[in-house]
Amino acid sequence: MNVQKLLASNGNTYEVSFAEAKHGGMKDVYFTTDGSHVVAFYRKKLDPAGRDRVEQIVSNYRTRILSQEGGEYWKSIFCWPAGTVESGGMLGIVVPAYERHFYFEYGSRDGDKLGIRGREKVGKWFASASHRNRFLDAREKGDWLSYFRICILLSRGVRRLHAAGLAHSDLSYNNVLVDPTSGRICIIDIDGLVVPGKYPPDVVGTPDFIAPEVVATNHLARNDPARKLPSNMTDRHALAVLIYIYLFYRHPLRGGKIHDLDPTRDETLSMGHNALFVEHPRDASNRIRLDTIKKSDLPWADTARLPYSLSGPHLAPLFEGAFIEGLHDPGKRPNANSWEEGLIKTVDLLLPCRSPNCETGWFVYPETTADCCPFCGTRIDRSVPVLHLYSKRSANSNYVADNHSIVVYDGLSLFRWHIDRNTFPNERLSVEDRRRVGYFQFHQSKWYFVNERSSSLCDVTGDKRQIPQGSPLELKPGTKIQSETDDRGRLLVVEFPSK
């Protein structure tokens, strides 16, 4: 067996087996003998700028993101190169091996005829209804809640890159590993990051995720000032496409409109200058034609049955910002922080479907209209409390609506970020704040909130009284729960929407 010990730029030595290579687009990949890392060698020698980019990514930018406070959190989001090595005059990067949950455990349907058991869970496998319905074992699919978690982590990772002055430049389902069974992700191909104004992109991106302005100007010379190259703004487009795909298993721009009889020209126009949202409310010319699709794409390809508005009041405006207002005006595209916040608020609106046969498993609860799961039609057979959140902006001010509500189901947990407006469920959350404050319970046809460990919660529906730890509080229309933490506290008002 051809094994070499290589000294990396980080000072560590890695024993690499050259017996068998995996071939990527630009690199040949080899595992270390202990399986903890891979070493990916560039097939072509990098120019000085490219080499400097890689060196900066594995040193300064790695330190900036992974070696500061909260760095351990980001190690689970990014597969960040640990260092560089050289062998035979070629440069390679040392990258941590993927966690076990990012490999298919059960493979494809019908006895794994596709042979994907043990292969990486590249996001493309989960990005279309046809792939999911035709190929994947049901145990690999996850439910709708897990895809919300995936999208939250994805938005959070992009937000962190942009905060560091970086752009991914090739954000796509090929460069994100996803595990729908646990709701985890890993952003890969970090060595191609763009530093605007310093390190330009190596590629324009992956088809389906390239921003329209990049597609429309790709024919221009690279140094033409009119040509648009990957940047933070194009990352915003790719992020929105990924979120739409993972929630609705269809592409937001691939509809039935024909722009040119020449297939190449038609592709350039449909993804570039003439790009049009398949659910545009004022222009239906690019709707998905149901007579041209596979049955395995249904029901998700039917935008009339499953429109983007099913994502709820926080995400629907972001999709409109990404694919209507901002599709050809990059400055109007929602940033990663907006997506992260909208997704977190939407998770608080999710209600589990009562049917054990519902593949989606969850849906955004519509407070005033539908009385059933929009995906399988199962009726909502019990009352559903909704808690509306209010907070103060100063100690002596009145409570103001936070545009944030919580849909209650049996067993739902209440966390500190629900009762303290200065606590946010992100990478900075302390271990203590990750513990739940209490939970909700449906018992003998009544709803209760059980306070487990907060000394600041009071029932202020009538006369103010503290909610003792371990004691249940029955939820009725108009029940008011107050968290007493000066200007940080919240007021939770209970409503039972009528159907």
Image: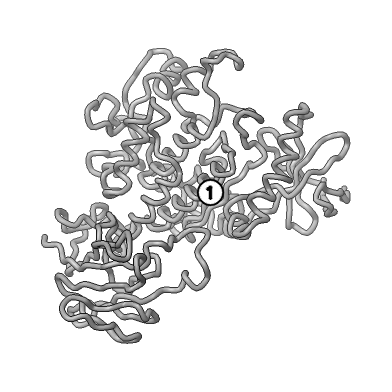
State the quadrant of the C terminus: bottom left
* Residue at horizontal 55 percent and vertical 25 percent from the top: 229
Q: Work out whether residue 42 or residue 385 is closer to the camera in this orientation and state it.
A: 385
Residue 301 seen in the current view: yes
Q: Is residue 370 above or below residue 300?
A: below
Residue 189 locus on image (x, y percent): 63, 41
* Residue at horizontal 38 percent and vertical 43 percent from the top: 249
Residue 113 locus on image (x, y percent): 53, 49
Is 37 positioned to the left or the right of 373 in the image? right
Q: Is residue 442 above or below residue 57?
A: below
Q: Which picture quadrant has residue 53?
A: top right
Q: Work out whether residue 176 or residue 212 is closer to the camera in this orientation and state it.
A: 212
Q: Which picture quadrant has residue 302?
A: top left
* Residue at horizontal 49 percent and vertical 48 percent from the top: 154
Q: Residues within 10 Å of mark 1 (few under 14, many from 20)?
A: many
- Write down the residue under mark 1: 157
